[in-house]
Image (cartoon, rainbow, N blue to C red):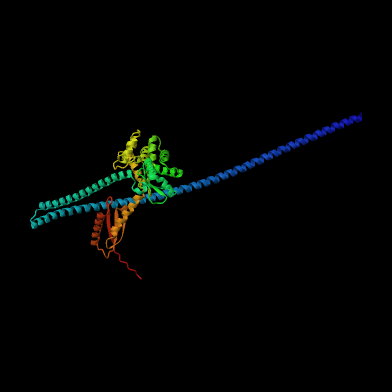
Amino acid sequence: MSNSLLMILLVLITGIISGSVGFGIKLFLDQRSQIASKNAANQQINMAQERSQEILLEAKEKSLQFRLESEKEINEEKRKIRQDQSKVDSLRDKVEKQISDLDKEKLNISEQVKFVEQQKKDLSNSRDIYAKKIEDASEISYQDAKDILLKEAQEDIEHNIAKKFRFAEQELETKVEDHAKNLIAGAVQRYASEVVAEETIQAVSIPSEDMKGRLIGRDGRNIRAIEKATGVDLIVDEAPESVTVSCFDPIRRQVAINALNELIKDGRIHPARIESIAEKSRRDIDKTIRKAGEDATFESSVKGLHPEVIDMMGRLKYRYSYGENVLQHSIEVAHLGSLIASEIGADEKVCRIGGFLHDIGKAFTHEVEGPHAEIGADFIKKYEMDPKIVTAIREHHDSDFSAAESFIVAAADALSASRPGARRDSAEAYIKRLKDIEEIALSFGGVENCFAIEAGRELRVMVDPIKINDDEAALLAKNIVDKIESSLAYPGQIKVIVIRESRSIETAQ
């Protein structure tokens, strides 16, 4: 039992010692942990203090740098202000100097005015003295001399007025003549093109001479049937394997051509077959005309036209004027008129439609009397279109216009017609006129070279200065003018300039 008790006491003492040791260790560890935490906190505080010092130093440096930069900018602005002030001072001094110079100039002018007034006064006195002397010497009073001078001046003025009146009269006669020519040309143009051979006839190829004979028929009955059915003239000559179709109406001519091609292709040629083929060809041409009109309206961006108007425009597919296809010309005028109208603020729709329809009168045959502009305007008027469009069609060949749209359509018409290649025949006539003018000048002796410029309105002639003197140069110009007036027909006026130049050239060695 004593051993047991001793064992229990030993265990208790061991437990108490172990607990005391454990409590001491825990207490030591806690104190150590507190010391470490305190040291860490102190370290963080020290680091924060050091960082705050660094931030403070950086702020001071930035503040110092900003102040230096601000001072630099302020100094630069002060420098610019001083420079501007210097410029202002300089300008002020300059202005003051100019004002001073102006004052001096004003004073000088004032003195000059006084001097001129005095000279004028002296001159007036001298004139009176000399007039008195002249009166005494010539036995003519001052008033009589004045009346004589006024009479001569009046005669000169009347002479000049008469010359100008004569010139205006000649110009008016020229314009009237040109207008008459235009009227005649318009009538001829509607009936046939300028170059009849090119625009009124067309050859059709024949595969063989036997086929040509079959086209003629016994006693010419087939060819008479073709001419009767189509309304054209067939010319059968010695040209091999071809027959010529002649007609002023381009549509009838095209019907005949199509019918002939169909007959040649089919091979069955007799009067009944000819009538059938001609009627079929006429229907095909009508379809072609309608399609051409519709295509043209689509290409021109023209909408709302009556079908009969479209058909009439399609007829222009086979109409030519001065070598230019009228339908294509109408499309160009429509586009040009629309562009011009959009630029100047006019009615674009009126200009487009008016430009497209301006030559519709040319689609009518020569049986309809009147200018094509009047015919076209009267035709369009029946379909209750905009009166401005009708007016533009009617006035596109006039010189006076009632509206801006009429002027634009006329201008677009002229622009399309003047396009290079549009009217080759006019260009050829123009070149021929220039050559004729130059040849007239070159026909005179002493002329070295000459040039017709300004579209033939001016002729510059270079002469040999040895052969032609100044007086002869003036006479030469008059002689050239006289020969041009007597030999050529030309619009407007032609100015002849004779140039005589002499040069002395030496070379220093």
- Work out whether residue 332 can be spotted: no
Question: Viewer-proximal residue, 403 or 394?
Answer: 394
Residue 400 in sight from this viewpoint: yes
Q: Quadrant of residue 271?
A: top left
Point out residue 15 in the picture as x, y percentages from the top left corner: 83, 32
Q: Residue at x 64, y 42 (%)?
A: 47
Where in the figure is residue 223, as x and y percent of width and height?
38, 44
Query: In the image, is residue 221 above or below residue 487?
Result: above
In the displayed structure image, the side of residue 487 where residue 306 appears, left or right: right
Q: How many marks?
A: 0
Residue 485, placed above or below residue 505:
above
Looking at the rendered image, the quarter that the C terminus falls into is bottom left
Position of residue 182 measured from the top left corner of the image (x, y, whole percent): 29, 45
Q: Nearer the viewer, residue 309 or 106?
A: 309
Which of the two residues, 459 or 325, is positioned nearer the viewer here? Answer: 325
* Residue sitting at the far bottom: 509
In this rendering, would 175 be left or right of 314? left
The image quarter containing residue 250 is top left
Q: Nearer the viewer, residue 472 or 49?
A: 472
Give the quadrant of the N terminus. top right
Query: Residue drawn 27% across and 45% down?
Result: 180
Name the outermost residue toward the top: 1
